[in-house]
Amino acid sequence: MGNVLAFVSIKGGVGKTTLALETATSLVKNFDKKVLLIDANFSAPNIGLYLDLTNDINLHDALEGTPVHNAIYECNGVDIILTSLHYKGDADTSKLKKIINKFKKRYDFIILDSSPNYEELKPVIAAADKIYLITSPDNVTLKTTLKAAKLAKEQNTPIEGIIVNKIRNPKHEFDLRTIEEMSEIPVLAKIKDHKKMAEALSKKIPITILDSRNVVAREVENFSSALCGISEGSNFFQRILPLKEFLGKEKVNRMILREKFYEDDYKI
């Protein structure tokens, strides 16, 4: 049965949609998983724009009773449910979890890209099995993102970790240890801001496909491997020097996440 993973933040522009899309693509491309990506940003969806997809039938239609399978599109091997950019109705977003539960047995992972809107975020967190917070390494974004963590805790949805995105100048940004101390949540990936991402956005192709050896694509792959419980790469020194103090914090946390993969009895 598929794991429902929500990528959340209560601040726009942190790269939440990009990371949800890249993770879904990496799980399919690098680990042969069956993935459903849902754009659950009900008022300002972006995935269709990122991939240049149009949606005659979308999530809003499914929430109003249209059979969900009619809203599923395929792109780069990922099944996708888009959301209407121009919807003017009053769909019942609380039905999201019910819709997802109908499809959990068909997928290894269901990934939700959420809205930064606090009210729209509530049904996404309620529908998710696990939460991944997305933040950039600055004070404003981190403290805003932690509001989403508070909401997840109120709804008893487990927060698995933080992905630190758009790292530009570590000299003037929070380091991973500080982020963990402030949030009390493990950092699972650190992703540098890279000019190649602009090219991927322009070409409407995930960086995972456009340039799989790019530093962003590699870190997304590392994170995705942890979701699958698969060892990270084949670094010789990591095999002969497995001591955790030799590894960065995010790598140690991914090792712990892999261990939880078996402890939680994931069925993927």
Image (cartoon, rainbow, N blue to C red):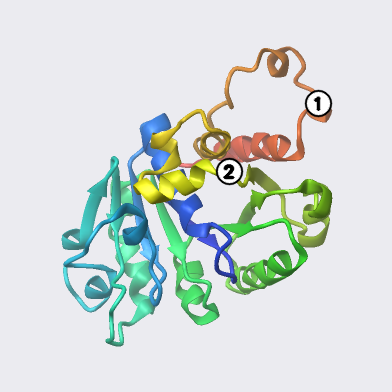
The secondary structure type at the circle numbered 1 is: helix
Left/right placement of residue 68 relative to residue 141 reads: left
Q: In front: 153, or 63?
A: 63
Instruction: Tell me which amino acid carries mark 2.
Output: His
Q: Which residue is mark 2?
A: 194
Q: Which residue is mark 1?
A: 246
Q: Of the residues tagged 2 and 1, which is closer to the observer?
A: 2
Q: In front: 143, or 194?
A: 194
The secondary structure type at the circle numbered 2 is: loop
Give the position of the C terminus as an image quadrant. Answer: top left
Image: 221 above or below 91 = above
Image location of residue 134, percent across then percent down: 60, 58
Image: 168 above or below 58 = above
Residue plotted at (30% across, 87% down): 90
Instruction: Tell me which amino acid carries mark 1.
Output: Phe
* Mark positioned earlier in the residue sequence (2 or 1): 2
Image location of residue 215, percent across then percent down: 58, 34
Image location of residue 37, percent across then percent down: 36, 54
Image location of residue 189, percent across then percent down: 64, 43
Left/right placement of residue 126 relative to residue 182 reads: left
Q: CA distance from mark 2 to mark 1?
A: 26 Å
Residue plotted at (56% across, 36% down): 226
* Disc sitting over residue 154 in the figure: none
Image: 52 above or below 121 = above
The reply to whether residue 267 is in sight is no
